[in-house]
Image (cartoon, grey):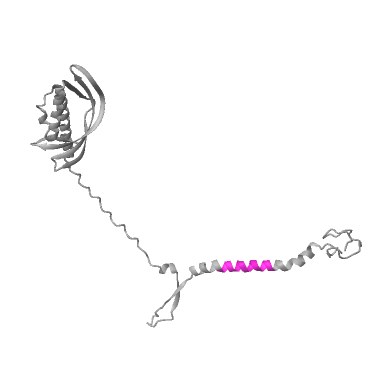
Amino acid sequence: MSNTVSCWQCGADLPDPEARFCPACGAALAKPTFWETFARRRGWLWTLLGVILVGASFFGLRWGLPRLRGRQVISTAATLVAPGGLPSAPVILPTDTAALAPTLTPRPPEPTAEPTAEPSPEPSATADLDALLLDAANRFQQAKADSQATGDTSRLGEVLAGDALARQIELVNQWKDQGCSWEITLDEPLTIRVLETRDGRWARIEVAKVETRRLTCGGELESATEGDAYTTTYVVEEIDGVWKITERE
């Protein structure tokens, strides 16, 4: 052992250079060599090596046995008949498990039915009805403008009936008695929206219009309204083959 002035383990000062153990920590004052340290610690190294070997054996059995079972060969006995007619001892012939597996034949696809062409719908009479109702609204608009400008109500019966006719005649006569007349013009074509129909001879329609109106009394312009856009709902009925407005809602 080599002498030292301080302990190699804890660094404490050594009063006796010849001491074999440190009075502070008790360590041997001769520092062990690498092989001495290895000899003391080889016990836990053998233990670690044993754990590794056991783990490797376990995983080898865990993953190896299923693969060996998948490759197992099934033996079938085949009997050979001797020339004299007596069967000989059975002979074991190896047979691969894949050869014993049933053969699956893919099912042919079922034929798809051809789509049948649906018959095209027959044209309805809606378009014709809309045209008739729009014509009735335009004829009323023209008759109203003519009667208000001239005071002549004789032709209103061609496009109006019932309450609508009586109301329009009353309005024309009222302005006529005051010495007034209306000049009514359309700024845009009329448009209609059919709200309800019954039996193809009765309908409620909404008429949209843009009008310019000028009121003249005694030869003087009293008022003027330009580009007035509004909608009015009418009841239209077919009377003696002619569509006439019978009510204003």
Which residue is more in the foreground, 207 or 59?
207
Q: Is residue 79 magenta?
A: no
- Residue drawn at 22 percent across, 22 percent down: 214
Which residue is more in the foreground, 20 or 68?
20
**Left or right of 57 on screen, residue 68:** left
Q: Is residue 52 magenta?
A: yes
- Residue drawn at 19 percent across, 41 percent down: 196
Secondary structure mostly seen in magenta is helix
Q: What stretch of residues is rendered in magenta?
A: 47-61
Residue 69 vertical position relative to residue 15 in the rendered view, above or below: below
Which quarter of the figure has residue 180? top left
Q: Position of residue 222 (x, y in %)?
A: 22, 20
Residue 174 vertical position relative to residue 110 in the rendered view, above or below: above
**Left or right of 235 on screen, residue 26:** right
The C terminus, quarter of image = top left
Q: Position of residue 105 (x, y in %)?
A: 35, 62
Which residue is more in the foreground, 86 or 119?
119
The N terminus, quarter of image = bottom right
Which residue is more in the foreground, 123 or 223?
223
